[in-house]
Amino acid sequence: PAQRVLPIVVVGYLATSVGVVVVIFLKTFNRSSALLRWKIAFATVTLAAATGGALLFRSASGVAIGVAAAAVLMSSVGLAYYAPWRSAYSYVVRRHAPAGNFDG
């Protein structure tokens, strides 16, 4: 049984490691409220997907599929929503510039 679950768990860990980029980005720019919201959403989606996978497949593989799917979904959504590839300068300028005085 563990041999069938292991590749699915590896996919989940890889997706979670991509999600760590979002955590590091939010901690770097001291966005703790956004980080807390993202962690709560990640935990909620993971619990819902794991429960759904368990009910749908009725096996350990189903739970692993649910957890991996939740990790892929949340990592993708986190990267798309917070977009850490934007330059740090544009984030700081947008945050601290007076209204109507942004050039970028």
Image (cartoon, rainbow, N blue to C red):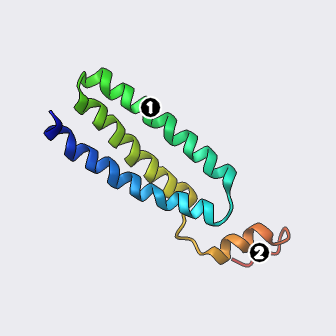
At x 33% / y 43%, what residue is drawn? Answer: 68
Q: Residues within 10 Å of mark 2 (few under 14, many from 20)?
A: few
On-image quarter of the C terminus: bottom right
Secondary structure at numbered mark 1: helix
**Looking at this view, is 6 or 37 the one in front?**
6
Q: Which residue is mark 1?
A: 47
On-image quarter of the N terminus: top left
| Vertical comparison of 94 with 50: above or below | below
Taking the image as shown, residue 63 lies to the left or right of residue 94, namely left
Whichever of labels 1 and 2 marks the residue nearer the N terminus, that label is 1
Taking the image as shown, residue 30 lies to the left or right of residue 40, namely right
Taking the image as shown, residue 67 lies to the left or right of residue 3, namely right
Q: Residues within 10 Å of mark 1 (few under 14, many from 20)?
A: some
Q: Which residue is mark 2?
A: 102
Q: Count the marks: how many?
A: 2
Rendering coords of residue 39 (x, y %): 55, 45
Extreme front residue here?
2
At x 50% / y 38%, what residue is drawn? Answer: 43
Q: Nearer the viewer, mark 1 or mark 2?
A: 1
Q: CA distance from mark 1 to mark 2?
A: 41 Å
| Vertical comparison of 90 with 17: above or below | below
Rendering coords of residue 89 (x, y %): 66, 77
Secondary structure at numbered mark 2: loop
Tag shown at residue 61: none
At x 28% / y 23%, what residue is drawn? Answer: 56
At x 71% / y 72%, what residue is drawn? Answer: 92
**Looking at this view, is 15 or 93 the one in front?**
15
The amino acid beneath tag 2 is Phe
Extreme right residue here?
98
Rendering coords of residue 57 (x, y %): 24, 25
The amino acid beneath tag 1 is Leu
